Amino acid sequence: MSDSSWGAPPAAGQAGYWGPTGGGPAQPVPGAVPAGPAYDAPEAQQTRPMPIVPGVPGVPAYGGDQDDDRGAARLSGPLFRDETLQARELPAENQNPEPMPDAPQPAPAPQKKSAGRDLSAAIGVGVGLGVVIVASLFIVKAVFVGVVAVAVVVGLWELTSRLEERKGIKAPLVPLALGGAAMVVAGYVRGVEGAWVAMALTALATLVWRMTEPPEGYLKDVTAGVFAAFYVPFLATFVALMLTADDGPWRVLTFLLLTVVSDTGAYAVGWRFGRHKLAPRISPGKTREGLMGAVLFAMVAGALCMQFLIDDGSWWQGLVLGLAVAASATLGDLGESMIKRDLGIKDMGTLLPGHGGIMDRLDSLLPTAPVVWLLMVVFVGSA
């Protein structure tokens, strides 16, 4: 080939190749890959590597060995059927646009506060128990002592049954029930000395009774038995001690009224105005406002009871008595709530509809009994 074949460059827009020394249009070399503007833009676009959709199983992220240009820009839009399918398979919440912020939203329905129990059943059972207690209290004192003894035995049965069910603790029920009933009767007949002697004998009987079984768990069983004897019958004995005075029925009635009024005030005020928790880890439902309600209600009721029901009583003594009752009743309620939380139960029993078990009604009464008995003795004497 002569040098003239590599002459002047091709005219503008003419396809061709430059030779090594210039000249005319070069002939295509067989087997060479044409480049540059030798092809129209659509055809050149088809010669580029097809972009690969990342995330598709079985397909490399960058086109394998034939695609090293990782910085190439993607073509927008669902070029491939896979992309369209993936868009259709998106969750509904991702496909549907969220409502505009200013779109009207339906207002949530107001929730009414719930008492958590069947109030009609609770009120009915409470009134029935009150009639039985008051009738036995003012007709025959011995019958009221019998009512207290029966309540003690049932309370011991509930407590020991829950201990065995939830913790595997087998506190001996037989010596506890016999000793508990004897404790209440001894307190009424022999006073404080009789109550202490019966308590000691009940604890001894619990230790001996448990010896008839294998020694495994002996310590925890007898410890729970002595605790149960002190917690239920011994504290209930102070109710019988109050009854021995000349105005004993009125003292017992004052004790019952103040405890019930304290619980009612705590419930009513706490349910309506309660905002600050009193002991959330023990009893989430109790509030400081409820405690203030208990104190206020109990102090007013105490002033009225001491002034009009108790011989030689005074209204200011009733204020002190009401304050003490509100404190002891609240602590007693929290104490049993601690026991029930440890056992993992809501109620000690189901004997009383709307209330739970007997122990669920004795929780505030038991620790309040010695407090009222002691203040009555200090204020007006024991006779």
Image (cartoon, helix red, strand yellow):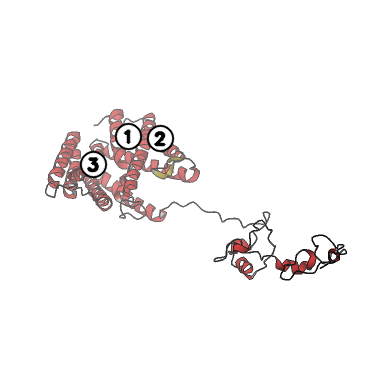
The residue to which callout 1 is attached is 310
Which labelled disc corresponds to residue 61? Answer: none
Q: Position of residue 354 (x, y in %)?
A: 37, 54
Of the 4 image quadrants, the one containing the C terminus is top left
The residue under label 3 is which amino acid type? Phe
Q: Tell me the mark number nearer the camera, choosing from 2 and 3.
A: 3
Q: Residue at left 25%, top 43%?
A: 232
Residue 41 left/right relative to 322: right
Label 2 environment density (alpha carbons within 10 Å; few <14, some 14–19, many ≥20): many
N-terminal of the pair, mark 2 or mark 3, is 3
Q: Tell me the mark number nearer the camera, choosing from 1 and 3.
A: 3
Which labelled disc corresponds to residue 299? Answer: 2
SS at mark 3 in the image = helix
The residue sitting at the front extreme is: 2
The residue to which callout 3 is attached is 227
Q: Position of residue 107 (x, y in %)?
A: 60, 55
The reply to whether discs 1 and 3 touch (Cβ–Cβ < 8 Å) is: no
The residue under label 2 is which amino acid type? Met
Q: Is residue 24 above or below residue 163?
A: below
Q: Position of residue 98 (x, y in %)?
A: 64, 58
Please tell me in which quadrant of the rendered image residue 220 appears. Answer: top left
Of the 4 image quadrants, the one containing the N terminus is bottom right
SS at mark 1 in the image = loop
Q: Note whether residue 179 is visible.
A: yes
Residue sitting nearer the eye, 83 or 206: 83
N-terminal of the pair, mark 1 or mark 3, is 3
The residues tagged by marks 2 and 3 sit, at their Cα atoms, a distance apart of 31 Å
Residue 275 left/right relative to 241: right
N-terminal of the pair, mark 1 or mark 2, is 2
Residue sitting nearer the eye, 371 or 219: 219
